[in-house]
Image (spheres, coloured by chain):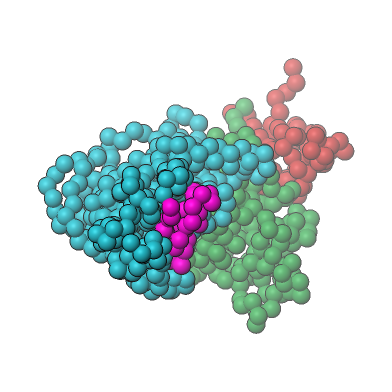
Amino acid sequence: MKEVAGYPDALTDKQFHYCPGCTHGIIHRIVAEVIDELDIREETIGVAPVGCSVLAYEYFNVDMHEASHGRAPAVATGIKRVHPDKFVFTYQGDGDLASIGTAEIVHAANRGELISTIFVNNAIYGMTGGQMAPTSLEGQKTTTSPFGRDVREAGHPIRMSEMLTQLDGAVYITRVSVHDPQHIKQAKKAIKKAFKIQLEGKGFALVEVLSTCPTNWGMKPSDSIEWLKNNMMETYPLGDLKTPEGVE
Amino acid sequence: MGEKVLMKGNEAIAEAAIRAGCRYFFGYPITPQSELPAYLARKFPEVGGTFLQAESEVAASNMIYGAAGAGARVLTSSSSPGISLKAEGISYIAGAELPAVIINIMRGGPGLGSIQPSQADYFQATKGMAHGDFSLTVLAPSTVQEAVDLTMEAFEIADRYRNPVLLVGDGIIGQMMEPVEFKEAIDPDELPKKEWATDGAKGREPNVINSLALEPEDLEDHNMKLKAKYDKMKEEEVRYEELYTDDADIIIVAYGTTARISSRAIEMARKEGYKVGMIRPITLFPFPTDIINETADRVDDFLAVEMSTGQMVEDVRLAVNGKKPVHFYGRTGGVVPSPEEIVNKIKEIGGEK
Amino acid sequence: MEKEKSVVFNEERCKGCELCVPVCPVNIISMADDINSHGYHYAQVKEQDKCISCAMCATMCPDVVISVYKEE
């Protein structure tokens, strides 16, 4: 019998702490599968964020550096400049990347840092207890927008990926989702492309992954999948926003 | 040792960092330290170094966090308001036990303050840099030559303790030109490999650079480990200089620029018959507590001289421990005290001769 | 000897989120009445012979619970 799906080498055997049905685990797995398929596990340095995935350094079976909130691209810049021949990625949520770390991601992208960023967008702060994120949808109820996000007060959902496409150093910006197996396969393909772009020295790449937060959305996992499909994709449409020539 | 060259303090510190084998600098422009990054931006290409002007001090401090974790000798420099912003990264660097060197060419504060010389960041440097239970090793040169020597040593201390080292000067140390001699340059390729660094887990278990410990007992263990390190510094790294302490009635305690001015004031006062000496802390953390305490047994008075409203004086009082009166003279806001002012204070303490 | 399984669930890792259940094209995944040591009703496949080794369940699983095998 041939294994067609199994446990990636690039994950440690530690069980994820994520809530049942949280799609962080899917994203961890496909990142790890790509690392295995590209055979770069021993060349990789990952940078973990602050947020629900703060403990990513316990799950990826590669050298890891735990950054402060939002600064993963700056930490990754320091690492990559010291080891330009190694593969460096950041794994960041939307509170981390789209709020406190806005400056760091913009300037890392603008410098064309040869790093790859996995940007997990679930439109809410998970770890701190379901607060409104800059990415929260209009009308979305959170603990800090209990009557729904009022865009007149809190602004509109921020589309980081679209913004980043304006920077010359960012060569591949795409938005994917993990709400069903087909989209998970596409997401994995996008991550592989982003990683190859770094390995080929082409520039900064970011994959935004729409993700769920059943606990803080207050839904069953299956309902949160539906909510993602029916609500998030309208504000955050899927697809390549910027892509270089000649990379598979 | 090479020949003497005339150099500005900021540039001499930068050259010393290169000689110490540092090849990575991440910083953000701020007066009065800007010659330091500018020098490295010019010189690093010759030695294969990486100079990066970050988008902010916050980003710069996190870049050195990354680069230090990756095993490099790494430097950042700034001035007071910029150090406040770098405090975030510095706390993580201390928590994750990484070596890095930080230069603070201090200016007046609080807030934007001024761009003139100041020593008002003493508390920040030695006590309240950022959140959490940690200390930096803090070095305070009073000449350009000493700034050069201590910069080179700072990298050694940082590596030895896996702790950030802060070198504090002020606008005068940074801007002043003095003849300096450099020690032999260190080849960064010859430095011992850091086995804990993130450089790809080839044939080994992954390395993790981290300052998070969710279990209280684990964090307490970590805090106690850090404390043991700081205690060891107190045993082994205290540096100071003594001047006329053998016959003095009054001991001035001053560091950096105010120590230079005080030594002039001491010569003037001694000509008028005042037996004044000085203990000049070279390390602000660890502070030369023991020598001050011992000296208190045989002198009458202490005088702390600072360019602040009185910060280090608190450590002098703790060291003297009530044995003798501790006086204070300070100018602040960018005003530099003159030797005459200090002599007047000496006369006030010492009475008529 | 029992026929080799096509799909293997690491029951202890399962958090009972049920995301694997609807993605199975042959509808053979169910939640156990039993619970694992974490207190979750874990996912299971009782009719191994019906598994077509498509790995949809493993793809969807957020906890890397599932391994899938195929005849060579």
- The residue shown at (47%, 57%) is B326
Q: Where in the figure is residue A36, as x and y percent of width and height? A: 50, 38
Residue found at the very far left of the displayed protein: B3
Count the marks: how many? 0
Q: Is A152 left or right of C11, judged from the image as shown?
A: left
Residue at the extreme bottom? A152
Residue B181, image x and y in percent?
18, 48
Q: Which chain is green?
A: A
The front one of A11 and B278 is B278
> Could you tell me if residue A144 is visible in this image?
yes
Picture residue at 23% right of the left edge, 51% below the top: B145
Up-down relation of residue A218 to residue B187 (above or below): below
Q: Is residue B42 magenta?
A: no
At horizontal 75% and vertical 32% (from top left) the residue drawn is C48
Residues A166 and C18: in front is A166
Which chain is depicted red?
A: C
Q: Quadrant of the C terminus of chain B?
A: bottom left
Picture coordinates of residue A228 (x, y %)? 68, 62
Chain letter, colour cyan in render = B
Does the image show residue B286?
no
Q: Quadrant of the N terminus of chain B?
A: top left
Q: Which residues are magenta?
A: B300-328
Quarter-of-image position of residue B25: bottom left
Asked if residue C47 lies left or right of residue A122, the reply is: right
In magenta segment, residue B324: yes
Q: Please report the residue visible at 47 percent of the width from the left and 72 percent of the height from the top.
A: B111
**Coordinates of residue A43 in the picture (x, y in percent):** 42, 39
Report which quarter residue B215 is drawn in: top right
> Which residue of the protein is positioned furthest toward the right in this rendering?
C33
